[in-house]
Image: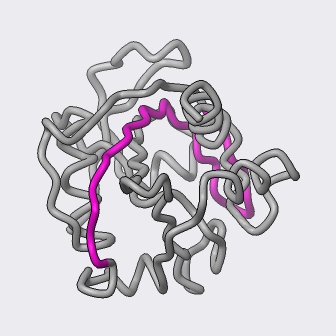
Amino acid sequence: MQEIFDVLKENGEYTNKTATREECHEKGLWHRATVVVVMNSKNQILLQQRSKTKKLWSNMWDVSAGGHVLVGEFSYNTAIRETKEEIGLDITEKDLLFIGSSCSTKIQGDIIDNHFNEYFIVTKDMDISKLELQTEEVQDIKWFGIEDLLKRIHNNYEGITDKTGCWTCLAKYLETRW
């Protein structure tokens, strides 16, 4: 199924136009994305290792789940859908805590990825060995301690994706609570 996104202006306003994922990434059209970070009661963060076949950040450790907001979707719908698709975890709107937003641009090869991002925290305890991963997207998942993750963020994204806005928002959230 071809993914269709709402196209936005540089300031985030809707244009009343839509485009495919390919068009957005080829032309650098602004569109929306959602990020979910799962935490547990042990103050650990669940990260996914991106598939080796991904065009961007292959084999890198990344947020728990995330993806593009489809045309007509709200960010919380995307957060719920992507978390289920990528790591097999069922969440609801009530599970989502909005922690911030940012704009990001990533240019790599023939991809120009201009996003308006919204970030959510989900707090859940679970046995991650029981989660079913979407192998085209995710090759592994693992709990990381908050101190370890913050160290990686502050050490030029050591071993994790260089999604600066995402990690900066998460670090700010974590550092004000722990």
Residue 36: x and y in percent read 39, 48
Please state the horizontal and vertical placement of residue 30, each as a whole percent of the image: 50, 32
- Can you tell which quarter of the image residue 109 is in? bottom right
Viewport quadrant of the N terminus: bottom left
Q: Quadrant of the rendered structure where residue 170 is?
A: top right
| Residue lying at 47% horizontally and 24% vertically, measured from the top left | 100
Height in image: 84 above or below 32?
Answer: below
* Residue 8 part of the magenta segment: no
Residue 91 on image: x %, y %: 16, 53
Locate the C terminus and report the quarter of the image it occupies. top right
- Left or right, 31 with respect to 125, comes to right
Question: Main structural element of the magenta stretch: helix, strand or loop?
Answer: strand
Total marks shown come to 0
The residue positioned 44% from the left and 79% from the top of the image is: 138
| Residue 104 locus on image (x, y percent) | 62, 35
Q: Is residue 99 left or right of residue 114?
A: left
Foreground: 117 or 175?
A: 175
In the rendered image, the vertical position of residue 123 relative to residue 111, given as above or below: above
Part of the protein shown in magenta: 104-127
